[in-house]
Every structure is written in structure tokens, then in C-alpha cells.
Image (cartoon, helix red, strand yellow):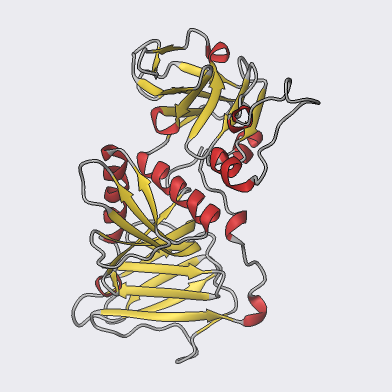
Amino acid sequence: MKYLVEELENVGVTLIAVEALNNVSYSISTNRSTLELRVINDSYKTSIRLKGLNLDNLYDEKNGHIHLSETSCGYVRLKRKTQALTNRISLVDLPDDKWNIERFKKMQGFQIACNNCKLVVLDSEVNIKKISEMPSEFWAEFMDYWHCHKPTIGESKTDAKPYDYYKELKPRLNEVLVGNTYFQTIGSTIDRKVVVQTDGSVDCSNCRSTLGYKEGSEILVLEKQNLQLQDTFKELSEDYPGYLVVLARILSLLKFNSTRYFALKTGGQKPIFIWVLAYDCSVAYTGNELVQRAYKLLYKDSWDRPPSSMEDIQLSDDLLDSFLQQLTKIHELIPENLKMFNGWKVSYMSIEDTNPI
């Protein structure tokens, strides 16, 4: 039995769908945060715990109550009463990334380690005195396109600093800049923790796994998918899966350019086209509890006439594979008649979709 519960908070619609067995019907009842699916003609029942789902002020326009009686894939679409739509969230208010600056500020102590050998590279108690947010991972693009007259400093042309001085955000000693998909610091902050190779690769000094790359003369970029976050107070650790890197890039461009269409490309694979259909969903699919702040993503591998507003995102093969595997995994958990939408495959993804520490 497959099921899907999708809450679109911003438009006040909740969809509850069940893929039933032949000649079996189901009823749905709600009690606060628990949604119960019960087989009508049998004593068997199962409950889906949906902690956090807003089931208040919902009504079924057709029947006035929540009931399923379809024999193959029954579903009911519920609408929230107008006066209950009070907590609409803007896209710009949503975080782009799981390891964001607000989360670090709430932690009582943390370490960032090599994901392979667990060597601690950054420690909030040792070599991090200040942690700051990157204004945007597209900082250079901001500087290129938002300035009609490129800025300079100084009283005269002789002591004015060049425009390129501003294109590079350089952290100070023991400062870390947090981007959506990476951390930036300088070599003296993580001295002897990493080795910078001649090709610019930044490797772990212990196991020689690649952690990131060197940018410019001093800046070291540590990519999150190569790292592990350790909460030293709770004694818990958390990895950063590759698919979240791709999702973070999509969300950055979604806010930056206000486009919902993306082409994910690599050097050796066919592109994958993504359509961000909805944001800030609460969703539960077969065998999983409620995931909040999810994005409804449609995807396909061919498109005859893509829109001019579509953004290209270049990825490594392993990142694209990770993203596609996650999309496919969730797609297969959706009831059959909801898997497709106008030729697109339907899936969901959230930056909170892995166990947070």
C-alpha cells in the first residue's frame, strides 16, 4: 500500500492519497497530528504519524468529511478555510541549505571534519573565532551586473584599489564564511590540517582525501559533501549528501534569478530537466514520516522546447547521480496515479530530509 500526504500551506490545500489493493476500501480519520488509514472491510488497520501536519480548519468541499472509497487509488483533496491562511512564507525567507549560519549560531559547540578519516579541520573552540554568512555564492556576479560604475577606494587614481579587489570576499584569520555548498577560510586558519596540491586541490593532511580547492592566492574552499558536521555538545555527527549540494544550487538560482526551470548538466551524461513546481510543502510518502519545508520537483530527461528562462547548472557525475537517485527513490514511493504530471515525473526533496543533529 502506497500513500502520499501533501500539504501546500501557502495555498491552503492538503492532498491525502492512498493506493489501495483491489476490492479494498479505506477510510481516513484525523486526530491532531495523527492521520489513520483504516481498511473498511477488515479488522486490519495502520496509522501514519504525521507530527507537525496542520489538520485544523480543513474541510472536504464534496463530502464535508474525510473519506476514501476508491478501489485502486483513492484520494481526497482538502482545502483550508480562508481565515486559517495566516502563516504564508515567502521563498526568500526559506533557508537554502541544511548547514546554514543560523544553525551554527544555535549550536553550543561544533567541529567540521574530513568525512573519510574524521580528522577535525575546523573547531568552534579552537580555530573559529568568527563565523559569517556569505552574502551569496554568486558574489562575483553581483559585482559584475549590479554596478554601472565599478567602485574604487582612495582620494586619487594612484591609491585607488582595482575593482577585482571587491570581487573576492576574503575571510580573516580564524574566520569562516558559510556558503550554501561550501565553507571559505584561509590557509593559516587550518594550518597543518590540509595540504594544498600543485593543481589547487585541497586535501586532508591525514588521509589525503580531497576536501575542496584553492581559490585565488589565499582562500581555501571546503566543499560540504566532503565533510562531516559534529555536534560536540550532543555528541552527534551528520554527513552532507551530494544531492543536497545540487538542491542548494537550485534554490540559490531560484531566489537569485526567479526562474523555476533548470538543466542539470555534466560532461558525459544527458541533461536532467527540473521544474520547481511548489515550495514550503509538508509531505509524507510511503514508509516515511512528515518532511517539512519540502520542494515539489518535476523532472525528465528530454525537452523539445525548453523556455529561455531556464538556467544551466554544471555538475560532476557523482553529484548528478546522487541527485537523480534521490529523486527516483522518492518518486517510486508515490501512489501510481500521482507519479506523473503532464509528462513530468513527480518527486519531492527537502534540505531537512536527512536526520538533523
**Residue 120 vertical placement versus 3 (above, below):** above
347 on left or right of 135: left
**Residue 190 vertical placement versus 115 (above, below):** above
Give 292 or 194, whichever is nearer the viewer: 194
Give 293 or 343, whichever is nearer the viewer: 343
Q: Residue furthest bottom?
A: 62
Toward which corner of the image does residue 318 lie, by quadrant? Answer: top left
Toward which corner of the image does residue 71 lie, by quadrant? Answer: bottom left
User: Who's the residue at 29% across and 60% down the image?
Assistant: 331
User: Who's the residue at 20% across and 42% down the image?
Assistant: 268
User: Who's the residue at 55% across and 74% down the image?
Assistant: 11
103 on left or right of 18: right
Give 186 or 279, whichever is nearer the viewer: 186
Point out the image quarter for the N terminus: bottom left
Give 355 or 132, whichever is nearer the viewer: 132
Horizontal and vertical percent position of residue 83: 67, 80
> Is residue 177 visible in the rendered structure shown here?
yes
Horizontal and vertical percent position of residue 192: 48, 7
**Residue 270 vertical placement versus 52 (above, below):** above
